[in-house]
Image (cartoon, rainbow, N blue to C red):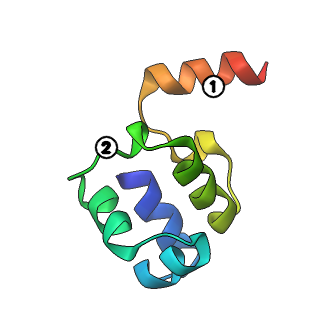
Amino acid sequence: MKKLKQLRMATGLSQSQLAEKAGLNVRVLQHYEQGTKNFDHARIDILLKYCIALNCKLSDLIENPEYLDLLKKYEA
């Protein structure tokens, strides 16, 4: 996932640092960043843990345009 990796790198965190900060397994993060797992289909608790760890909004991480549209409608 491009956005997840970009935000992680922008914060200066390694994969293991982000995984630890989010309380998640580093292998899971690696799968999301490599695209072998679809981040947009992750459980909401995983998405939110990454948002909290990266201090960002859910819309900053989601790439699927349909999901982004739904988020915009929800937040309106």
Q: Is residue 3 above or below residue 54?
A: above
The residue labelled by disc 2 is 38
Q: Quadrant of residue 63?
A: top left
* 43 vs 52, nearest the viewer: 43
- Tell me: 10 left or right of 48: left
- Residue at screen point 44% across, 25% down: 65
- Tell me: 14 left or right of 22: left
- Tell me: 26 left or right of 37: right
- Residue at screen point 43% across, 83% down: 16
The residue labelled by disc 1 is 71
Q: Is residue 22 above or below residue 38?
A: below
- Residue at screen point 56% across, 72% down: 23
Which percent across, then down, holds residue 40? 41, 38
The Cα–Cα distance between marks 1 and 2, rounded to whole angstroms, is: 18 Å
Q: Quadrant of residue 20?
A: bottom right
Which percent across, then down, holds residue 13? 52, 81
Indicate the amino acid at tag 1.
Leu
Mark closest to the chain's N terminus, 1 or 2 = 2
- Residue at screen point 27% across, 50% down: 37
* Quadrant for the C terminus in the image: top right
Indicate the amino acid at tag 2.
Asn
Which percent across, then down, holds residue 54? 63, 65
Q: Is residue 41 above or below residue 55?
A: above
Question: Badge 1 local density, few (<14 within 10 Å), some, or many (20+)?
Answer: some
- Tell me: 18 left or right of 73: left
